[in-house]
Image (tube, rainbow, N blue to C red):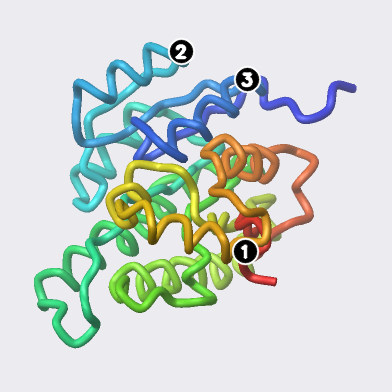
């Protein structure tokens, strides 16, 4: 028996045109899965999909229509990787109601809608993997990321609760919580070299993580071998949370 293979499985990866989402999709393909990438911007999405051998669909999963388009294109989804871009920074007391709503739709409600859309098929087939990308800030909130802190915590606890319901059906629900990872978002949030050096000095591994290191955790949770792991939050943070 060949271990850690996903031959014949279909995967949908949202936010899949770059960063952690793209790295996760690449790993799933290497394990044999057929992957569909969903994102909002066609140019970068098409380029990314062609580079790794995935199919793609332009979809804004913060809307019901976008979720429906993504799931329809992917077909019978066995593996869902729910990955949403992070809400913008700000002071908690100054976040507008519109910003809270946007974070709710993009980060939290998208995860719920996607799960609801793929679950009937997973339960019928008695096999499924629902994996959401969250953040280490679920347990250690970042002072300037109130919307992200709140919505990613909501996703984490939603999937822990859903895991209890669907475990008898062979469906697992887990989250992967990256630490400081070298993505475009990290560069945008920490663009001062002096501040970056201070941040790295606080990470026990003394470096930023790489998207492929987070992707490896996602790929493992998608495998048959991870069938007894559900309702878990898997931290990939270089020791930050110790």
Residue that protrudes farthest toward the right in the picture: 1
Q: CA distance from mark 2 to mark 1?
A: 29 Å
Badge 3 crowding class, 10 Å Cα cut-off, few under 14, some 14 to 19, many 20 or more, is some
Q: Which mark is residue 30?
A: 3
Q: Earlier in the sequence, mark 1 or mark 3?
A: 3
Task: Name the residue tied to disc 2.
Answer: 53
Q: Residue at x 75, y 46 (%)?
A: 226
CB of mark 2 within 8 Å of CB of mark 3? no
Query: x, y percentage for residue 48?
Result: 36, 20
Task: Name the residue tied to disc 1.
Answer: 233
Query: x, y percentage for residue 193?
Result: 37, 52
Looking at the picture, tell me which residue is in the foreground, 147 or 120.
147
Vertical relation: 238 (above or below) 127 = below
Tell me the SS state at disc 1.
strand
Q: Is residue 139 left or right of residue 95?
A: right
Vertical relation: 15 (above or below) 236 = above
């Amino acid at each position: 028996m060949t271990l850690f293979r996903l031959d014949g499985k279909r995967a949908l990866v949202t936010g899949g045109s770059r960063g952690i989402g793209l790295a996760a999709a690449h790993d799933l393909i290497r394990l044999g899965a057929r992957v569909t990438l969903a994102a909002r911007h066609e140019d970068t999405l098409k380029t990314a999909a062609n580079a790794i051998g995935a199919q793609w669909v332009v979809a804004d999963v913060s809307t019901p229509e976008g979720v429906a388009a993504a799931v329809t294109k992917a077909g019978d989804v066995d593996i869902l990787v729910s990955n949403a871009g992070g809400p913008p920074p700000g002071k908690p007391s100054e976040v507008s109601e519109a910003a809270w709503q946007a974070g709710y739709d993009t980060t939290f409600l998208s995860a719920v809608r996607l799960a609801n859309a793929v679950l009937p098929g997973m339960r019928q087939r008695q096999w499924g993997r629902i994996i959401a990308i969250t953040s280490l800030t679920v347990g250690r909130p970042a002072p300037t990321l109130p919307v992200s802190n709140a919505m990613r915590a909501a996703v984490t606890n939603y999937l822990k609760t859903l895991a209890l319901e669907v475990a008898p059906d062979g469906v697992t629900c887990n989250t992967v919580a990256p630490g400081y990872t070298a993505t475009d978002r990290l560069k945008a949030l920490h663009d001062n070299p002096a501040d970056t050096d201070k941040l790295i000095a606080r990470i026990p591994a003394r470096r930023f993580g790489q998207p492929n290191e987070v992707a490896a955790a996602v790929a493992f949770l998608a495998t048959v071998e991870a069938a007894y792991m559900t309702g878990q939050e898997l931290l990939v943070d270089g020791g930050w949370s110790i």
